Amino acid sequence: MAYGITSEAQLIDIATITAGCNQYKQCLEDFETNGNRVIEAGEICDAKALSIDYTTLQWTINDLGEEIKNVKTTLSAAADGVVAAAQRVYNEQVAELNEYRRQLAEQEKLRQQQSSSNS
């Protein structure tokens, strides 16, 4: 018994973990929205508008917008990893609880059999 689970009250709260990660991921939408805004700013401020000595910052601005959007993907994947790990632990805990209950039932059955044979 890796977790020492003997009752349902000891199981991790997978629903709360999942809900929290989903709320977190909803907040990450701002990264995509703002990344798109930065890209849009880079397009508005085109090479001609952002040119200094024939060098432009437009592509740098666009690249930064893409990097901001990529943060969402990275953080969202991390949240998915938390949910997957929590689900794995939960499944292991449920299996452990079921095994504990099976052993208790088996012990009770043996006691009843011993009581019956002693009577």
Image (cartoon, rainbow, N blue to C red):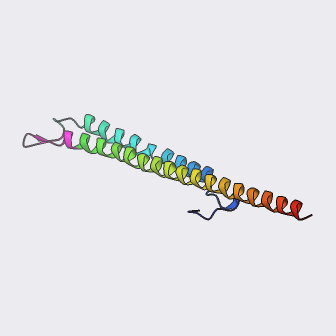
Report the quarter where the N terminus lies: bottom right
The boundaries of the magenta stretch are 50-60
Q: Residue at x 65, y 55 (%)?
A: 99
Q: Is residue 24 visible?
A: no
- Asked if residue 106 is positioned above or below residue 118 in the image, the reply reads above
Q: Residue at x 70, y 58 (%)?
A: 103
Task: Give x and y (percent) for residue 95.
Answer: 62, 52
- Asked if residue 92 is positioned above or below residue 40 in the image, the reply reads below
Q: Nearer the viewer, residue 119 or 98?
A: 119
Q: Quadrant of residue 11?
A: bottom right
Q: Quadrant of residue 65?
A: top left
Q: Is residue 54 left or right of residue 68?
A: left
Examine the structure image and report whether residue 67 is included in the region drawn in magenta: no
Q: Residue at x 25, y 40 (%)?
A: 62
Residue situated furthest left in the rendering: 53
Report the quarter where the C terminus lies: bottom right
- Asked if residue 23 is positioned above or below residue 4 in the image, the reply reads above
Task: Give x and y (percent) for residue 26.
Answer: 50, 44
Examine the structure image and report whether residue 56 is included in the region drawn in magenta: yes
Q: Nearer the viewer, residue 103 or 76?
A: 103
Q: Residue at x 62, y 50 (%)?
A: 15
